[in-house]
Amino acid sequence: MRHMKSRRFAAVLVLAIAGLASAALESEQFGSRRGRRRGRGFDREYRIPSLSNPARPREFYFTRAAYTGYGFRNFRSWSVDFPKADRQFLIGVRRLTNLDAFELENPVQLTDPNLGRFPFVYAVEVGYMALTDAEVLGLRRYLLAGGFLVIDDFWGTFEWENFRLEFERILPGRPIVDLPLDHPLLSCFYNVKEILQVPNVGNGIAGGPTWEKDGYSPALRAIFDDKGRLMVVINWNTDLGDAWEWAENPYYPLKFSTYAYQMGVNFIIYAMSH
């Protein structure tokens, strides 16, 4: 039965991926149409106008943290894989669940007072995070008020140390622990039995290695509040976003895309139900 469910999921995912090529093209056109300014923080040209006056409210918006960073692609480390990964992942979310999800990306500054509207926030490349004091305060308020943060795509001990120091500012004294495999997060929609290391697109297509820098082993870690509520999920030494972004590529291994979509859907369902 488990193998039948696995094959059924893969078949549905393949059908969803079949529609991703047009989304990829649309995303590339979006990027060239908007232009990209240099700057340390959020690029306001990426804000989606329809969010301020949508045709109708949606149950879920895939919200990406737009934060201040350093030393990475014109200082916009938050925007790696953006917006293609966001849009393609949302195609899968809408196909694999009955969640009424907004079709487009939703980048939000950590200082934006509307951040609290969104129960789910996604952040990447936190090894290059360099938050202002105002961003630290905004993210702390969001998390302590019930927000849920998913961190992805950072590798090795150097980037981990930068992440750890930044979160010591955000949630001082709060321990970072390994998330046990029997935690409800890993079974709230799909049953995930093993933590895989998801490679970037180049390594995935080449057949390996799956690791980068000295990040040889994947880890799923977490930060809880005083009552045991899961506030932050940390995907270290893995790159779920690349598996979403390149899911339509026939040379990118399906097992990594399948895992990444299952994990992503579980993150959303857990955030929306806790």
Image (spheres, grey):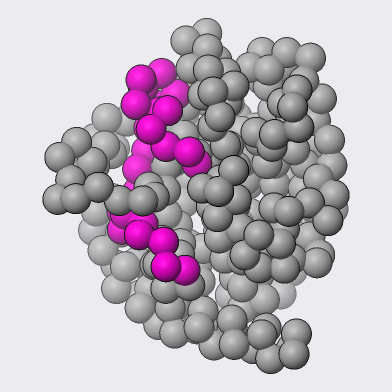
Image point 57% across, 26% down: which residue?
143
Image point 68% across, 17% down: which residue?
171
Residue 114 is left or right of residue 235, and the answer is: left
In the figure, residue 266 lies in which quadrant?
A: bottom right
Instruction: Give the percent coordinates (x, y) of residue 67.
Output: 47, 27
Total marks shown come to 0
Of residues 111 and 81, the one nearer the viewer is 111
Position of residue 98 relative to residue 107, above or below, is below
Position of the N terminus by quadrant: bottom right
Residue 55 is left or right of residue 262, and the answer is: left
Of residues 231 and 14, the one nearer the viewer is 231
Residue reaching furthest to the top? 133
Could one spot residue 179 in this view of the protein?
yes
Of residues 145 and 170, the one nearer the viewer is 145
Could one spot residue 161 in this view of the protein?
no
Image point 25% across, 47% down: which residue?
57
Image point 71% across, 62% down: which residue?
187
Q: Which region of the structure is painted magenta?
A: 97-120
Position of residue 259 relative to residue 118, above or below, is below
Instruction: Give the percent coordinates (x, y) of residue 227.
Output: 74, 27
Position of residue 14 relative to residue 64, above or below, is below
In the figure, residue 118 lies in which quadrant?
A: top left
In the figure, residue 5 lies in which quadrant?
A: bottom right
Position of the C terminus by quadrant: top right
Instruction: Give the percent coordinates (x, y) of residue 199.
Output: 67, 61
Magenta highlight on residue 274:
no
Magenta highlight on residue 105:
yes
Instruction: Give the percent coordinates (x, y) of residue 42.
Output: 37, 27
